[in-house]
Amino acid sequence: MRLNGIVLGMICIARIARGDAPSIAGHVALGVRTTSTSDAQYGVVWDDTGSVRAAAEGLIGLRIGPAVVGLHAGIATPMSFSASPIYDSAEQVASTDSTIYPFDLGLGAQVDVSGRFWISAWLGATVSLSRASSPAAHINAIDFTGDIPAASWSDRTTSLGYGAALGYDVDVTQQGRWAVLLTLDFQGIADIPFRNNNGYTTSVNENLTSRSLTLNMAYRY
């Protein structure tokens, strides 16, 4: 990352020296998203996320010729999960409901390719901000028997995230360009909030991955 910054700085200095300074450019986009997640490894987590979500993302950076290089950020309405210890028909076990807000942050690039078409990509991290709740319950399981109180807690985990997009400018003005943008994002969901039968709150590392397809309306500047 430090080497990339040095190279970008040298390019900018060279362009400024010849009177062709790079300009601030990028895009913002808002759209609807559909997401699928990988299966939980141990069968204790269920994905309750709705089929359609709202999402927003953007890129701000320096334009150098046909390319813009800078900082990418993205956010979407939360994902929902339920978790519970594995049990048989005779057991009463704890349960946990959680909402996870994924926030993407990383290095991004945007390149004009042909006519009004352009592509964009990013690589970085997905920060998962989670809020969880578990009701009071009487537990009757092989590992614990007794009452546990209601509980709620928050957590944060970070995992790999990356994505790519294809855009088409539908309207070009002096102020900017309105475009249709189709994005494909891959996000890791490192930990899912989880409550043991004895009432202890924790998380399970299921290493879930989500794949999201988003249709956006974007503005390029």
Image (cartoon, rainbow, N blue to C red):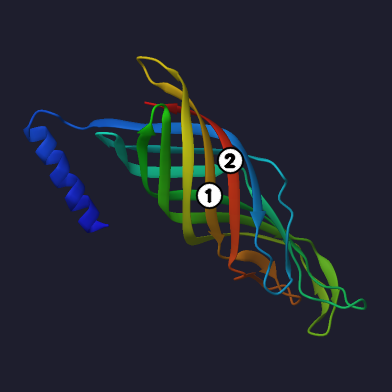
Residue 149 vs residue 193, the one in the foreground: 193
Q: Which residue is mark 1?
A: 185
Image-based side of 59 in relation to 139, left or right: left
Does 109 sit left or right of 64 as displayed?
right
CA–CA distance between discs 2 and 1?
A: 8 Å
Q: Is the N terminus in the top left, top right, bottom left or bottom right quadrant?
A: bottom left
The location of residue 210, given as percent across then percent down, is: 60, 56
187 or 151: nearer the viewer: 187
Name the residue: 50% across, 49% down.
103
Q: Which residue is located at x 35 percent, y 38 percent?
A: 111
Q: Which residue is mark 2?
A: 214
Q: Quadrant of residue 59?
A: top left
- In depth, the one of 145 and 79 nearer the eye is 79
Report helix, strand or loop for mark 2: strand
Q: Residue at x 40, y 44 (%)?
A: 72
Disc 2 vs disc 1: Cβ atoms closer than 8 Å?
Answer: yes
Q: Is residue 6 above or below residue 66?
A: below
Picture coordinates of residue 164, whole percent (x, y): 47, 46
Task: Indicate the amino acid at tag 1.
Answer: Asp
For the residue carrying disc 1, how many other residues have a C-alpha within 10 Å: few (<14), some (14-19), or many (20+)? Answer: some
